[in-house]
Image: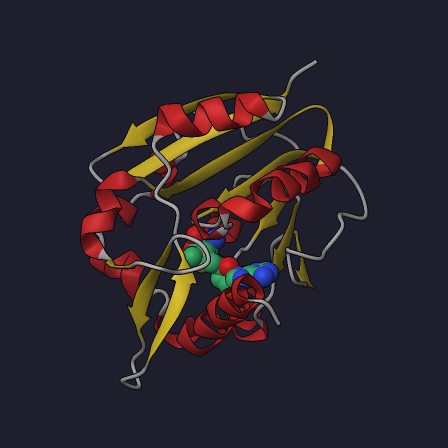
Amino acid sequence: MDDLSELLREQAVYYRTHAGEYDLAYEANEELRSLEMLTDGLPIAGDVLELACGTGQWTSLLARRGHRVTAVDGSPEMLSRARKRTAGLAVEFVEADLFAWQPPQQFDTVFFGFWLSHVPPQRFGDFWDLVRRALRPAGQACFVDSGPGDAANEEVLVGQPAPAVLRPLGNGGTRRVVKVFHEPSDLAKALEGIGWSARIWPVGATLIAGSAMPQG
Ligand code: SAM
């Protein structure tokens, strides 16, 4: 296994181990108290594919707004929490590795919360190709994520195969995860370079949100 694949494996293991503690971040972080507010300005419409749904914080919001949601995550522990959170709502869950998965159909919106920052630069183009394949004509990608202001809250590592941080676990251990703190205008330029038209803005001190659609 090469160094990048090993880092991505460690990232997946981190989230599997961390699933039971994950929602604490939503209680502790002021900026995450109103997910409704964080989606202001995002053109979320129609059938939604949600990538890396985690414990279903966004899944539940989207489904309660009346969207039919297909939600993908690699962690069975995360998915079981998301299933409980969305019981009775129109959600289909898929367990899959997003670095290998292919969308079986197209959607009006592809949404991802706190996932793009975990995609290493080496996989950026492939990831956005996946998003493009998953979108119906005129569909849009929408996302919320950490921005550069969030780096101060992380233990940033050097000398890794991709930008990475070290995360503590409740059991005293630590794991590395990929973390790219995208600056809105640089991210918009990078997306333009691979054929997307994007609008990305800062939200509060530590977050970013944005939407993107394929050009032409
Ligand atoms: N979107 C949710 C949210 O905002 O609360 C969860 C985001 S969490 C930061 C990242 C999620 O990515 C975790 O649920 C983790 O299980 C998932 N994940 C990590 N590596 C993955 C992979 N290779 N394929 C699919 N999901 C993965």
Residue 57 visible = no
On the rendered image, what quadrant is the N terminus found in?
bottom right
Q: Nearer the viewer, residue 73 or 91?
A: 73
Q: Quadrant of residue 205?
A: top left
Residue under the point 25% across and 47% down: 150
**Is the residue 82 above or below the residue 63 in the image?**
below
Q: Residue furthest right?
A: 104
**Is the residue 159 above or below the residue 59 in the image?**
below
Residue under the point 69% across and 42% down: 130
**Is the residue 190 above or below the residue 197 in the image?**
below
Colouring method of the image:
secondary structure
40 displayed left or right of 116 = left
Q: Position of residue 102 (x, y in %)?
A: 76, 50
Residue 60 visible = yes
Q: Nearer the viewer, residue 189 or 31?
A: 189
107 displayed left or right of 145 = right
On the rendered image, what quadrant is the C terminus found in?
top right
Q: Position of residue 138 (x, y in %)?
A: 69, 20
Q: Position of residue 185 (x, y in %)?
A: 37, 23
Q: Residue furthest bottom?
A: 171
97 displayed left or right of 161 = right
Q: Residue furthest top?
A: 216
Total tally of numbered discs in the picture: 0
Q: Position of residue 104 (x, y in %)?
A: 81, 48
Residue under the point 39% across and 46% down: 180
Residue under the point 31% across and 86% down: 171
53 displayed left or right of 48 = left
